[in-house]
Image: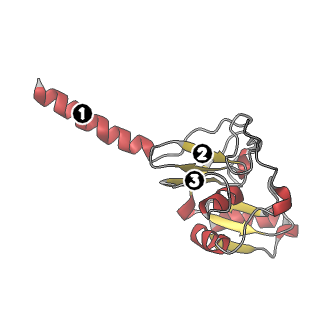
Amino acid sequence: MRRRELLLGLLGVAFLGRALAAPRALRVGVEACPYCFMTVLDARHAAQAVNPQGRAFFYDDPACLLDQLNGWGGPSLSAREVYLADFGGSTRTAPRWVAAERALLYHHPRIRTPMGSGLLVFADRQALAEHLRARPERAGGRVLTWVEALKEGEGRTWVPADFLPPPPKVP
């Protein structure tokens, strides 16, 4: 009996470990960004961070997550996993998640995003090239990796200050 319990326990731990290393489901129109307090209304711009305890936090713009990780506001966040919605592969209601370290961020100040950051995320260079072929007016921007965007965010916020609402009043 002890052997069976041990094997079942080990299988459970192995399964749990795999289950935690995956993006969580986003509820569009329900989840609120912990940085800017806005509801996530367009899954194409969404981002998510999973803390060491396995709790997922959803963002309406990858810039909010970048700023929070760099300590520009919101509660302190330690992220074990970070996922970004692939703009080209997502719809307004369903994100196609890509691990942040594999994603390409495209920055162009004329691109309208929920928080005015001008950041779009793509799964690869081919998806970005297809997007720019379809939207040539967006050409001329910068391509960044997640690490480069984080590093740049140490010196300045990605979200323009005039886009941030005041924090909610605590009674």
- Please determine whether, in this image, residue 62 is positioned above or below residue 58: below
**Circle 2 Cα neighbour tier, 10 Å, few/some/many (<14 / 14–19 / ≥20):** many
Q: Mark 3 or mark 1, which has the lower sequence index? A: 1
Outermost front residue: 171
The type of residue carrying mark 1 is Gly
Q: Mark 3 or mark 2, which has the lower sequence index? A: 2
In which quadrant is the N terminus drawn? top left
In which quadrant is the C terminus drawn? top right
Q: Position of residue 4 (x, y in %)?
A: 15, 27
The type of residue carrying mark 3 is Tyr
SS assignment at label 3: strand
Reading the image, the residue beneath label 2 is: 57
Residue shown at the point (80%, 66%) measured from the top left? 133
Residue 112 visible? The answer is no
SS assignment at label 1: helix
Reading the image, the residue beneath label 1 is: 9
